[in-house]
Amino acid sequence: MAKLSETGLKFCKDRRGNIAVIFALSAIPIISFVGAAIDYTRATAARSSMQAALDSTALMLSKDLSTGTISSSQISTKATAYFNALYNNKDAFNVAITAAYTAATGANANKIELAGTGVITADFMRIAGFPTLNFGTASTTTWGNVRMRVSLVLDNTGSMARDGKMPAMQSSAKDLVDQLSKLAIVNGDIYISIVPFAKDVNMGASNYNASWIDWTDWDAANGTCSSTSYRTQSSCESRGKTWTPKNHNTWTGCLTDRDQNYDTLNTTPTAANSSTLFPSEQYSYCASGSSPYLETVMPLSYDWASLKSKIDAMEPTGNTNQGIGLAWGWQTLSAGAPFNAPAKEAGYLYKDAIVLLSDGLNTQNRWYSNANQIDARQKILCDNAKAAKITLYTIQVNTGGDPTSSVLQYCASGANNFYLVTSASQTASVFKDIATKLSQLRVSK
């Protein structure tokens, strides 16, 4: 009996088996925590894939609505269709989404808000009394608070008369005007300027009293000597004769490249610094009534009919100077003279862009007749424009087997912004692609 009592006492004092009891008691919460982590991971995966599907749905809805493919009353139905095609998480059930559209007012953007919810079955947390886990997320897309100012810098040189290039460019540029104009909710959302160029640009002879014109070279080349034996200012005055420049109202309206380095900048011209002024030139193709005629520059406008009429009026003539076209395209987007672009209002994001189309390699500017030298100036100009946050799209219409233009490739704001067209018929799709890029949408959360 004493032995049995001693054995019982030892058993009561023995603690070596407690670990099994403790483990048994702690196993339940440990397994629950591990299981909860697994369940939450599944719920997070379902939520992440829902977020991606909602983002894509919101973008597609915004695009459809802005292009007129759907009306605002169709948003909910279309949202469900897009989302169901995109969302394929097999753990989720009771999945539902809602869509709400708010139209733009003033500086407030168009907005589509999507919200999604769903449920997954819990494999482990049901032990703790949670048989299911709910999840949800949302996505918002906004558009319409981005205002665009686009300069169409279009080659009007003589070679554009070949292979149907000029009519193809005109038709495509007008289509771009139409496509961009549809994005405008109110006047001023979209502005477009037109810059026809050859060797020079034409600002119109009616500007002969403008303060931003430099007449130095024009006066030296256009006038009469007191002795009819001399035809130039230098020869006249070197013989002690008097040179009398013609009246500036006989100017044809053309301007050539500014002094270096202002030819690569958009500096506002001032009388205090003659190098900032735009040099006049008596280019015959700018004379009113001449045929062919280099069409005048059109400042930023939302008069869509007038913009398209300007494009229709263009005629091919003269040599190629892409740099002057690009410089004036940038100038039309600038706040200073000669165009004094409309002030940018607070509450909007502004995108400035230049679309430069040319069918050939550079052949002539104010200083050079060597393509490499002209290209070098143009590259500096493009660097400066891009540094000023101008987005550049460049198009080479190459129907004659010329080398691919390295300067147009360089000037584009990225490889996808340069287009090589080998047939005039391709011009339309290029302009359509550029218009789509200009109106790209932005997801905001």
Image: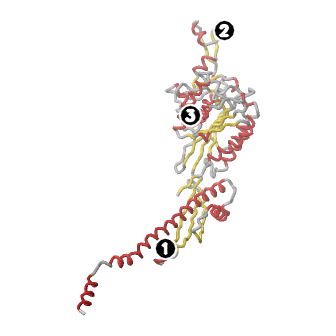
Q: Nearer the viewer, mark 3 or mark 1?
A: 1
Image location of residue 342, percent across then percent down: 57, 42
The residue positioned farthest toward the bottom in the image shown: 1
Q: Position of residue 295 (x, y in %)?
A: 69, 32
Identify the secondary structure beneath mark 3. Answer: helix
Query: Do the residues bearing badges 1 and 2 touch, measured as CB atoms within 8 Å?
Result: no
Whether residue 234 is visible:
yes
Indicate the position of residue 268 as horizontal and vertical percent values. 53, 33
Q: Which residue is mark 3?
A: 382
Separation of residues labelled 2 and 3 (CA atoms): 46 Å
Q: How many marks?
A: 3
Where does the N terminus fall, quadrant-wise? bottom left
Q: Are marks 2 and 3 in contact (CB under 8 Å)?
A: no
Per the image, the residue denoted by label 2 is 228
Relative to 234, say whether 210 is above or below: below
* Displayed quadrant of residue 204: top right
| Quadrant assignment, res 192 | top right
N-term mark: 1 or 2:
1
**Residue type indicated by callout 2:** Thr
Residue 267 location (% of width, % of height): 52, 32
For the residue pair 243 and 311, the one nearer the viewer reads as 311
- Does residue 236 sit above or below 158 in this rendering? above
Q: Give the residue drawn at x 66%, y 47%.
A: 180
Please tell me the numbered disc located at residue 322: none
Of callouts 3 and 1, which one flags the residue occurring earlier in the amino acid sequence? 1
Instruction: Report the mark closest to the observer, 2 or 3.
Output: 3
Q: Amino acid at mark 3?
A: Cys
Q: Quadrant of residue 357?
A: top right
Q: Is residue 344 above or below residue 274?
A: below
Is residue 247 found left or right of 121 in the rendered image? right
Mark 2 falls on what kind of element?
loop
- For residue 124, the mark is 1
